[in-house]
């Protein structure tokens, strides 16, 4: 069977809209915070069943501390082509019990719930896009497709990064089911790299009344370092440094001997990532009697808009045009697992999931009318790559 026309594909997914919503409800109501392995694994069990019913071959990458990572492989009619990797995550930022305060609900053309935008609706879009392709092609996808849903994306992807990179190296392209950028539904062709660092200062304790001059304040030194670090921000180059958490001291009448700060670094290019890492690691104390130590690294390399990414975006824009809308692109400050695959040189297009707003917030929501359009866009890409 030949694939339906773009308008026929969109019409198909519009008829499937209620089924897509049912899938979203099913997986949103299974809470899956990153730090609760049993909860994430419960969701994995449901998703393995749903994708298995479509003919996907399920593989679990078992983890001790985190939820298992779920890999699902679909064979293609053309065995001589590399698979396309669909990339997403099952974990959310919400604690167990959030669903009681943020109940799944449909209102004013939107669906609300914890993790609905980031990124459980994206998983549902992937499932129904594959289901549509199977229906149009007699139960067999035109080309191989691998789906990887990791359990630790929201906390840095430390246990899943190697798996993601290994599968990406075997793939023709990577399509990331993270939310679109903005309410216009732009796909993401660039993301900043992310670094996490800790600055520790060691001074000398003393009684603040009796022996003040004998003390060396770690808090004062930390304050000076925070000002120095803040001066490294360069908005014209897309470099930001945020001192997001500080601590220090023991009692108000003791000159503090220890203090620390947690730093968040964002960079647009790999060159800036290397330069900023060097600058942070070379910080020196202004008070020679204090000692400073910096630890950390760039944990997500920048996703830079390459010729390969631009070509993939052009393909997506053409598909969207055939479906009746102009697909825009965006560069964003947040990172995703697409950063890893793009840094390997694999053509990567991000933001192919749901359209909505409020990620990680109580008003997190997805625009229902956009769901069929995103499923049609994803299925079109899977047919054209």
Image (cartoon, rainbow, N blue to C red):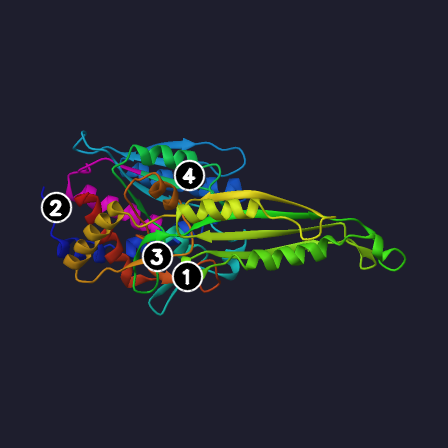
3D distance between C-alphas at marks 4 and 3: 34 Å
The image quarter containing residue 333 is bottom left
Q: Secondary structure at mark 2?
A: loop
Q: Between 144 and 245, which is closer to the camera in this rendering?
A: 245
Q: Where residue 228 sits in the image (x, y, percent)?
A: 59, 57
State the residue position of label 1.
236
Which of the numbered marks, if any, corresponds to residue 45? 4
Query: Residue placed at 39% from the left, 49% from the top?
Result: 269
Residue 106 as seen in the image, left or right of residue 210: left
Task: Report the mark closest to the observer, 2 or 1.
Answer: 1
Residue 296 as seen in the image, left or right of residue 48: right
Task: Report the mark closest to the observer, 1 or 3.
Answer: 1
* Res 33 visible: no
3D distance between C-alphas at marks 1 and 4: 46 Å
Question: Could you tell which of marks 2 and 1 lies nearer the N-terminus?
Answer: 2
* Res 37 visible: yes
Q: Find the magenta span and give its range.
A: 122-146
State the residue position of label 2.
3
Marks 2 & 3, CB-CB < 8 Å contact: no
Q: Where residue 363 sits in the image (x, y, percent)?
A: 45, 65
Residue 144 lies in the magenta stretch: yes
Q: Secondary structure at mark 3?
A: strand
């Amino acid at each position: 069977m030949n694939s339906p026309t773009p308008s026929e594909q969109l019409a198909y997914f519009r008829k499937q809209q209620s089924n897509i919503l049912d899938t979203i409800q099913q997986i949103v109501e299974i809470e899956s915070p990153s730090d609760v392995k049993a909860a994430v694994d419960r969701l994995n069990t449901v998703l393995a069943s749903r994708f298995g019913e479509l003919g996907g071959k399920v593989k679990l990458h078992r983890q001790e501390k985190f939820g298992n990572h779920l890999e699902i492989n679909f064979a293609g009619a053309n065995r001589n082509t590399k698979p396309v990797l669909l990339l997403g995550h099952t974990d959310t930022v919400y604690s167990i019990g959030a669903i009681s305060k943020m109940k799944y609900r449909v209102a004013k053309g939107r669906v609300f719930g914890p993790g609905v935008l980031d990124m459980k609706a994206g998983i549902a879009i992937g499932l129904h896009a594959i289901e549509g392709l199977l229906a149009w092609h007699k139960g067999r996808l035109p080309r191989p497709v691998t789906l990887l849903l990791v359990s630790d994306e929201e906390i840095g992807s430390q246990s899943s990064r190697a798996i993601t990179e290994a599968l990406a190296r075997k793939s023709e392209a990577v399509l990331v089911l993270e939310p679109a950028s903005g309410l216009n539904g732009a796909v993401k062709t660039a993301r900043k790299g992310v670094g996490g660092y800790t600055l520790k200062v060691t001074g000398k304790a003393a009684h603040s009344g009796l022996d003040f001059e004998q003390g060396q304040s770690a808090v004062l030194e930390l304050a000076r370092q925070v000002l120095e670090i803040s001066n490294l921000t360069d908005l014209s180059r897309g470099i930001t440094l945020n001192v997001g958490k500080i601590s220090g001291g023991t009692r108000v009448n003791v000159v503090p001997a220890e203090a620390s700060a947690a730093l968040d670094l964002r960079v647009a290019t790999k060159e800036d990532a290397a330069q900023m890492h060097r600058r942070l690691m070379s910080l020196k104390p202004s008070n020679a009697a204090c000692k400073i130590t910096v630890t950390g690294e760039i944990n997500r390399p920048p996703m830079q808009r390459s010729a390969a990414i631009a070509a993939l975006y052009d393909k997506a824009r053409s598909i969207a045009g055939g479906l009746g809308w102009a697909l825009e692109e965006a560069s964003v400050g947040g990172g995703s697992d697409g950063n890893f695959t793009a840094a390997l040189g694999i053509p990567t297009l991000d933001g192919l999931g749901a359209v909505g707003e409020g990620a990680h917030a109580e008003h997190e929501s997805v625009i229902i009318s956009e769901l069929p359009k995103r499923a049609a866009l994803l299925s079109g890409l899977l047919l054209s790559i």
